[in-house]
Amino acid sequence: MTLQTRDSTRLIATLARYLPRGDLYRLVEPVDLVQADDPDTTIATIEKFPVKVGGL
């Protein structure tokens, strides 16, 4: 099964500096996942997806 997002996904963060170095981003809102041939039926939802950008 291959899933795709129903709508675009947005992340938000409070950056300590530019360029990001280990700053944590989070989802603005949950992301619904659907099958390409049935975009009206949500198969799964991503509630949290913390992402660390830059740095180690």
Image (cartoon, rainbow, N blue to C red):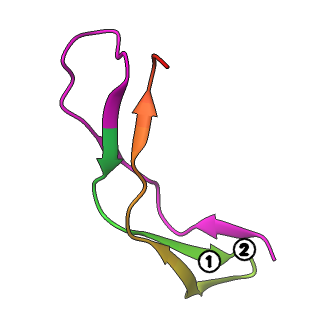
Label 1, residues with CA under 10 Å away: few <14, some 14-19, many ≥20:
many
Question: For residue 22, which quarter of the picture?
Answer: top left
> Percent x, y for residue 10?
37, 48
Say whether residue 21 is magenta.
yes
- At x 34%, y 9%, the residue is 19
**Type of amino acid at the residue the image marks with label 1:** Val
Left-right relation of 55 to 43: left
Q: Is residue 48 above or below residue 36?
A: above
Callout 2 touching callout 1 (CB < 8 Å): yes
- At x 43%, y 27%, the residue is 53
Label 2, residues with CA under 10 Å away: few <14, some 14-19, many ≥20:
few
- At x 75%, y 81%, the residue is 37
Rounded to the nearest angstrom, the CA distance separating label 2 from label 1 is 6 Å
Left-right relation of 19 to 13: right
Give the number of the mark in front: 2 or 1. Answer: 1
Say whether residue 11 is magenta.
yes
Q: Which mark is residue 34?
A: 1
Secondary structure type for disc 2: loop
Start-end of magenta stretch: 1-24
Q: Which residue is mark 2?
A: 36
Q: Is residue 52 above or below residue 46?
A: above
Magenta segment, principal secondary structure? loop
